[in-house]
Image (cartoon, grey):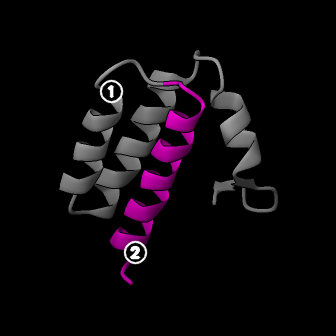
Amino acid sequence: MTLVEAYRDDLSELVDRLDERGVFAPGEREAWEEGIEEADHYSTLKHANESLLEAMSDRDGVEEVITEHTHPETNQFV
């Protein structure tokens, strides 16, 4: 598995978890998934991750998802 594939999987998992918490408005999940799938470089995925977290930061449930799925030693989403 390449770094891009691993990062894509992690971002997809984050989107799944956010969706389970009801964070997204109708159609948002699909838009984020499409952007993740189309990304072909690590830097593009990193930007998508940062954009996703910034866009969703003020919504209910986001903080819980991040807290529950972040590795405490590396502070990275897992």
Q: Locate the C terminus and report the quarter of the image it occupies.
A: bottom right
- The residue located at (33%, 20%) in the rendering is 26
Q: Residues within 10 Å of mark 2 (few under 14, many from 20)?
A: few
| Gap between marks 2 and 1 measured at Cα | 25 Å
Between residue 47 and residue 15, name the one nearer to us: 15
Instruction: Say whether residue 71 is magenta.
Output: no
The circle on residue 28 is 1
Q: Residue furthest bottom?
A: 1
**Which structural element holds mark 1?**
helix
Q: Residues within 10 Å of mark 1 (few under 14, many from 20)?
A: few
Between residue 54 and residue 16, name the one nearer to us: 16
Q: Residue furthest right?
A: 72
In this picture, residue 54 sits left or right of residue 45? right
- 24 is higher (above) or lower (below) than 70: above
In this picture, residue 41 sits left or right of residue 1? left
**What amino acid is labelled 2 in the image?**
Leu
- The residue located at (65%, 56%) in the rendering is 76
Residue 14 in the image: state x and y as whole percent: 52, 47
Between residue 30 and residue 53, name the one nearer to us: 30
**Which structural element holds mark 2?**
helix
Whether the residues at callouts 2 and 1 have beta carbons within 8 Å, the answer is: no
The total number of labels drawn is 2
Residue 3 in the image: state x and y as whole percent: 40, 75
Q: Nearer the viewer, mark 2 or mark 1?
A: 1
Q: Locate the N terminus and report the quarter of the image it occupies.
A: bottom left
- 60 is higher (above) or lower (below) than 54: above
Q: Which residue is mark 2?
A: 3
Chain part drawn in magenta: 1-23
In this picture, residue 66 sits left or right of residue 43? right
- The residue located at (25%, 63%) in the rendering is 41
Residue 67 in the image: state x and y as whole percent: 75, 41
